[in-house]
Structures are given as structure tokens and as C-alpha cells.
Image: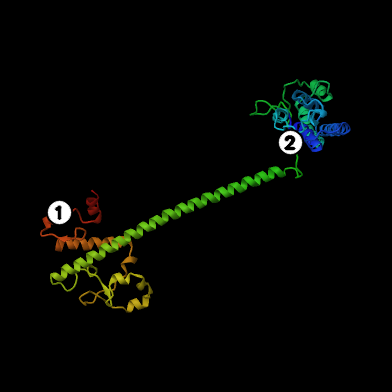
Amino acid sequence: MMYNDAKCVILVGEYTNDQGGGQEPSKSGNSRLRNEIGRDWRIAVSGEMDTTKQRMLEDNVRSSGVTETSDVVGSEDGDAEDDYMSDVFTSVVLDVRPGIAVGRSQRRIMKIEAERNEVEERIRSIPKRADLEREMRESALSKPIGEESKGFALLAKMGYRPGMSLGKQKQGIEEGIKEPIAIDFKTCRTGLGHKALEEEKKKQRNAILQKRLAARTNSNQFLLVDFRKRQRIASVQKQLVGDVMKSRKACQELDLRNGLELPSNAYFWPIYMEGIEEEQVTSKRANVIGEEQQEEMIFKYSNGKLAPAEPKLIELPETELMDKLEDVTAYLREKHRYCVWCGCQFETAEELDGQCPGSTRADHEGIDDE
């Protein structure tokens, strides 16, 4: 039972209590009250429920013992008040069935909405004119020309049969075209050949872009290889300069111990420019010195003896640095039995040959790696 149905029955009970006030009404008052209750009850039911729900309400009222509105008013035995929590009312309230109470206006809105959805679905299902034209065109083009056609009759007189190709047989081509050339229908407003021209331009732009990307990749690869090469050369050259300076200092110290005032070779000893060491000359400060000023400088050894002018070692090529290093190390090993990379002076030449791994840095680095 819906809530609205139970509400109508409770409304009748409340109405009788309000009118009766717990006192026994008179016959005339009872008749008037019965008419008013019946009228209000019929109006409430007809305004909110359909015929089926009215019948259900009447059945529930009859089953609960309230068959007439006069029973709700009260009997003549003096029962002035009704128990609204009794089974007469609670059974009706608890009888709740699934559903939605829909009024007349709501049903009208739902009907209009359903009709509109139906119309929209029907409109969407209607094929468009362009689709119909395409289907008709494809259907017509897919059918071969019938024998009733005058053109086909003329070809038949010339010896044509269905399945044969038209035209003269050409060399290198086994058979000609057996079907008509397909028609390319334009759907845009551009001119003839515009689409093919745009595609060709697009291909050309893509090709140019690919070439630029390939050239940029090659350039980056070349720059990377060149950078690594320059870094390797700079590292090797810096290492050679360090070995040359170390060998020259060791040669100068050993020669001075033996009482020599000048080196056997001019570049075997470090050369200083007006008291500034060569390492300092090769630094950033030496870059400020111009060529004319450098010609006016005086070059000396550490003992004050004059020395020939010498360019900065960092500016010398790698081959020249290697030659200088080989000459100095050979002199140290022969005259002083000294090895720069071992860092010690041996007692005899046999001890030098037996304990020193070699006369180059690579020989000593190989021993260190092992």
C-alpha cells in the first residue's frame, strides 16, 4: 500500500476526532458529519489515486473493519476515542509496495520526453543525402554494362566479348585493363590536381626535413668526435709537458750535484724568464705578454747563467714534446741512472735495467695496472 493511500484513511480518523471531541454526537450532527467525511474522503482519493489504488484502499479498509465512515465517527456505546496505533491503521501504513507516486503533470512530462526521444532517434536513423548518393553511385558503377546497351552492342560487333581487355596489345604487358578506370569523385572545393600537388609538396618537405636532421646528426657526431679528440690531445699534451718539466728539474739537480754549471743540452734544464718560472709563464699571465715584449725578455737558468729563448711548452706540438722527453730521459738513464717514473736513482746500470720496467710512461703504467 502506498503512503498516500494510508494517509487518506488516517485523515478520516483525525477528522472524526476533531469533530467529535470525545462526545457522542446527535443524530442530525452525525448525519452531517458523515456527509462531510464521505465527501472529503472521496475528494482526497480521486485527486491522488487512480481506480486501481482506490479499490485497493477500499479492500484494506474493509479488511480492517472500517467499512463506512460512520464507523470511524464512533458508536453509540460511548467509545469517544480511537487508538491510532492499533492494527486498523498500522497495517495500512506498513503495507508499502514498490513504485513512485506520479501525478498528472509528471506523467505528461514523461510522455513528452519519451516522444521527443523517439523523434530524435528516428531522425538519427534517417540516412543523409550524401550517403544515399554514394550508395546509389557505387551500386550503379558496380554493375557491368548490359547487352541491351547500344555501346555494348557496337563493341560486340567489333569482336568484343565480356572479360576481354580493350586496346592494342603492348610489349612487356601481358594483358590490358579489363575493368573501367575508377572515377575519383571530389568532395572538396579545391581545383583539379590540388590534392596531388599538396601531397607532393608534403613529401618534398619531409625529404628536406629528413636531410636536415641527418646533416645535423652527422654534424653533432662530428663535433662530438672532434671534441673528444681535442680533449684527448689536450690531456696527452698536458701530461707530456708535466713529464718534460719533471725530467728537466731532475736533470738540473743531478747535474748541479756533479758540479756542472751549464747543461749538456740547452733545453735539459728549466729556463726562467727574468726570475719567473716557466710554469708561471705558461699560465694565463703569460698570455698578456706580447711578442715584442717577449723578445726583450732575458732568459736564464736557476744558477743565473744566461739561457737561450724558448717558446712556451704548452704551445709546442705533441711530436716535439715527445722528442724532448725522450732526449732528457735517455740522458738521465745514461749519465745518472735515474728514472723519472720510478722516482729513484739506481746504484748501477745493471740494477736500472733489471728493476726499472722501461723508459716510457706506458711501460710503468702497464706495471701499475697489473
Label ID, residue 355: 1
Give the image's coloring scheme.
rainbow
Left or right of 345 in this view: 214: right
Circle 2 Cα neighbour tier, 10 Å, few/some/many (<14 / 14–19 / ≥20): few
Residue type for callout 2: Asp
Left or right of 314 in this view: 155: right
Residue on which the image places disc 2: 184
Label 2 sits on a secondary structure element that is: loop
Look at the image and tell me whether residue 195 can be seen. Answer: yes
Q: Nearer the viewer, residue 132 or 101?
A: 101
Q: Residue at x 28, y 60 (%)?
A: 322
Q: Position of residue 285 (x, y in %)?
A: 35, 73
Q: Nearer the viewer, residue 316 or 172?
A: 316
Q: Position of residue 271 (x, y in %)?
A: 26, 72
Residue 161 appears in which quarter of the rendering? top right
Q: CA distance from mark 2 to mark 1?
A: 91 Å
Circle 1 Cα neighbour tier, 10 Å, few/some/many (<14 / 14–19 / ≥20): few
Residue type for callout 1: Gln
Of the image marks 2 and 1, the number of the one nearer the N terminus: 2
Residue 241 appears in which quarter of the rendering? bottom left
Residue 235, placed above or below residue 4: below
Q: Residue at x 51, y 52 (%)?
A: 216
Residue 81 appears in which quarter of the rendering? top right
Residue 256, placed above or below residue 219: below
Q: Nearer the viewer, residue 61 or 330?
A: 61
Q: Position of residue 341 (x, y in %)?
A: 21, 58
Q: Farthest front residue?
A: 77
Residue 248, placed above or below residue 148: below
Left or right of 327 in this view: 120: right
Label ID, residue 226: none
State the count of labels.
2
Q: Position of residue 291 (x, y in %)?
A: 37, 75
